[in-house]
Amino acid sequence: MDIKSISSKPEKWIVDRFEGTVAVLMNASMKTKNIYKPLLPADVKPGQTVVYSHGKWSVDDADSTERSARINDKFAKLKARNNI
């Protein structure tokens, strides 16, 4: 994947999954990008938010935590509604 094809404005991407040495990222518009996994921080995990800025990828811990809390809240509400 050509890093230059990513907007110069920092954009948030979610790590969807890993396929061997490739990380599949998805943005808010559901657009996907395949990134060579070693270009990402070594400890990145699926579900985390990453941002490409100033020539490098970094994890957005605050956004990752907020997204995880929203997902957990929605799941808890579904479970309660369905008596699971």
Image (cartoon, grey):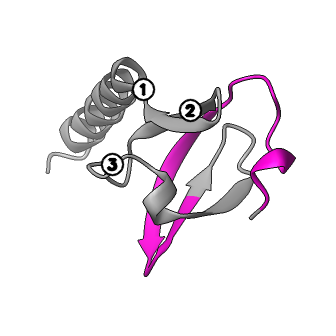
Q: CA distance from mark 3 to mark 1?
A: 10 Å
The stretch in magenta equals 2-24
Q: In the rendered view, does 57 fall on the left or right side of 27?
A: left
- Dot 1 falls on a residue whose secondary structure is loop
Q: Which residue is at a point 15% across and 45% down the rendered structure image? A: 83
Name the residue beneath numbered marker 2: 51
Q: Is residue 14 covered in magenta? A: yes
Q: CA distance from mark 2 to mark 3?
A: 12 Å
Label 3 near label 2: C-beta < 8 Å? no
Q: Position of residue 57 (x, y in %)?
A: 52, 39
| Few, some or many residues within 10 Å of mark 3 (<14, 14–19, 20+) | some
**Disc 3 marks which amino acid?**
Val
Label 1 near label 2: C-beta < 8 Å? yes
Q: Is residue 44 covered in magenta? A: no
**Disc 2 marks which amino acid?**
Val
Nearest to N terminus: mark 2 or mark 3: 3
Q: Position of residue 74 (x, y in %)?
A: 34, 33
Name the residue beneath numbered marker 1: 60
Q: In the rendered view, does 46 fall on the left or right side of 69?
A: right
Q: Quadrant of the N terminus?
A: bottom right
Q: Quadrant of residue 77?
A: top left
Q: Position of residue 78 (x, y in %)?
A: 30, 40
Q: In the rendered view, does 37 fall on the left or right side of 3?
A: left
Name the residue beneath numbered marker 3: 44
Q: Which residue is at a point 50% across and 55% down the rendered structure image? A: 39
Q: Position of residue 37 (x, y in %)?
A: 47, 64
**Disc 1 marks which amino acid?**
Asp
Q: CA distance from mark 2 to mark 1?
A: 7 Å
- Dot 2 falls on a residue whose secondary structure is strand
- Dot 3 falls on a residue whose secondary structure is loop
Nearest to N terminus: mark 3 or mark 1: 3
Nearest to N terminus: mark 2 or mark 1: 2
